[in-house]
Image (cartoon, rainbow, N blue to C red):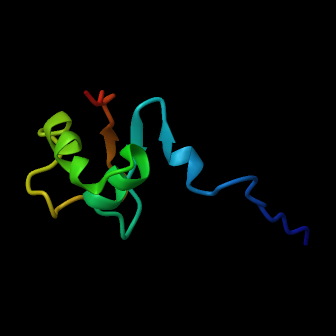
Amino acid sequence: VTVLHAIPIGDPGAGRFVSGKAIIRRGDTLWDIAHRYYGSGIRYRTIVRANRDLIARHGRIYPGQVFELPLVYDD
């Protein structure tokens, strides 16, 4: 029996943040996603505003959801 193994190349989480979207994994929080993508966890509010239809409550996100991550400009 031939067994194939997938070997990740580069950062395994890198493909989760593509073209302004994030795919939610188990254990993710909005704060962590904002920190990784925007560099500041407090920006979780930006993610909530952009995805109101998918996020019923701030603490209720589920694996497999795909969130929009809009651009944020600092003044």
Please provide percent x and percent y for residue 29: 29, 63
Give the residue furthest to the front: 75
| Left/right of residue 54 with respect to residue 5 in the rendered view | left
Location of residue 67 with respect to 5 vertically, above or below = above
| Left/right of residue 43 with respect to residue 33 in the rendered view | left
Give the residue furthest to the right: 2
Please provide percent x and percent y for residue 48: 17, 44
Of residues 7 and 38, the one nearer the viewer is 38
The N terminus lies in which quarter of the figure? bottom right
| Left/right of residue 10 with respect to residue 65 in the rendered view | right
The C terminus lies in which quarter of the figure? top left
Location of residue 1 with respect to 21 vertically, above or below = below
- The answer to whether one can see residue 37 in this image is yes
Give the residue furthest to the left: 57
Residue at (84, 63) in percent of width and height: 4
Of residues 4 and 28, the one nearer the viewer is 28
Residue at (30, 27) in percent of width and height: 73
Please provide percent x and percent y for residue 11: 65, 55
- The answer to whether one can see residue 62 in this image is no
Please provide percent x and percent y for residue 41: 28, 56
